[in-house]
Amino acid sequence: MDAKLLDILACPLCKSNVQLSADKTELICKADGLAFPVRDGIPVMLEEQARTLTTDERLDSK
């Protein structure tokens, strides 16, 4: 994913920054505890498509 795009993307719910997951398949919002999918290089920033992070994922400081 392009670094410039990642810099301007924000969580659609709380407007906080999102982070690209290690495997580059999701954008993570730690504030809301959600993971938004990245499909074919395109972030899907819809609440309905997001999954809830596990407790371990929420506590991970990366």
Image: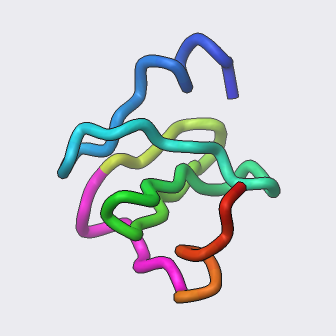
Residue 1 as seen in the image, left or right of residue 17: right
Residue 59: horizontal and vertical position, in percent?
A: 59, 75
In the rendered image, residue 52 lying in the magenta stretch gets the answer yes
Expressed as whole percent of the image width and height from the top left, the position of residue 53 reads 49, 78
Colour basis: rainbow
Instruction: Report the residue at 58% width, 11% height from top.
Output: 4
Residue furthest to the top:
4
Give left or right: position of 62 versus 36. Answer: right
Left/right of residue 47 with respect to residue 3 in the rendered view: left
Screen quadrant of the C terminus: bottom right
In the rendered image, which quarter is residue 50 located in?
bottom left
Residue lying farthest left? Answer: 13
Residue at 25 percent of width and 62 percent of height:
47
In the rendered image, the residue lying farthest to the right is 23
Region rendered in magenta: 46-54
Q: Is residue 2 above or below residue 52?
A: above
Horizontal and vertical percent position of residue 2: 67, 19
Residue 15, compared with residue 39, is above or below; it is above
- Compared to residue 37, the image places residue 9 above or below, namely above
Q: Which is nearer the eye, 31 or 6?
A: 31
Q: Work out whether 47 lies above or below 40.
A: below
Residue at image x 52%, y 58%? Answer: 37
State the quadrant of the N terminus.
Answer: top right
Residue found at x 54% / y 37%: 42
Q: Is residue 31 magenta?
A: no
